[in-house]
Amino acid sequence: MESIRDHAGEVRICASCGQPCGLGETESGEMWQHFSEQWDGVHCPRFPLASVPLIMEWDEMALKQVKAEYPDTRR
């Protein structure tokens, strides 16, 4: 699981909880999963994986803002 701030790939939205998710490496190969900032604050039945990731048509500024301001629940 990586940080949303460092994630260079596509960011989608988990259909189960509405939180951002990204494609990342797992023991079973690449899968959509929640970001490390969400470790202690996301209550998703599929966590740490994401369920049916919904495609978002982010504009560049909106995605930058989400990445910069997303709360880190590990702190």
Image: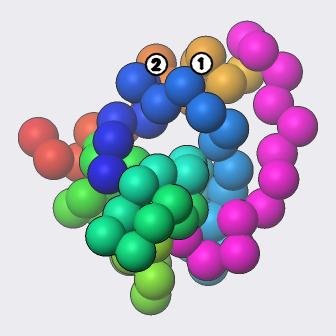
Q: Quadrant of residue 11?
A: top right
Picture coordinates of residue 23, whole percent (x, y): 56, 52
Count of residue discs: 2
Label at residue 14: none
In the figure, 51 relative to 14: above or below?
A: below
Q: Who's the residue at 41% across and 55% down the image?
A: 25
- Which residue corresponds to the image point at 46% horizontal and 19% vertical from the top-left? 68
Q: How many residues crowd around disc 1 within 10 Å: few (fewer than 14), some, or many (20 or more)?
A: few
Range of magenta residues: 50-61
Q: Disc 2 versus disc 1: distance between alpha carbons?
A: 5 Å
Q: Amino acid at mark 2?
A: Ala
Whether residue 46 is situated above or below residue 12 in the rendered picture = below
Looking at this view, name the residue that lies furthest to the top.
61
Q: What x and y, as percent, mark residue 20? A: 57, 50
| Extreme-right residue of the structure | 57
Q: Which residue is mark 1?
A: 65
Which residue is under mark 2? 68
Give the farthest residue toward the bottom: 45
* Residue 8: percent from left, percent from top: 55, 25
Which quadrant of the structure image shows residue 75? top left
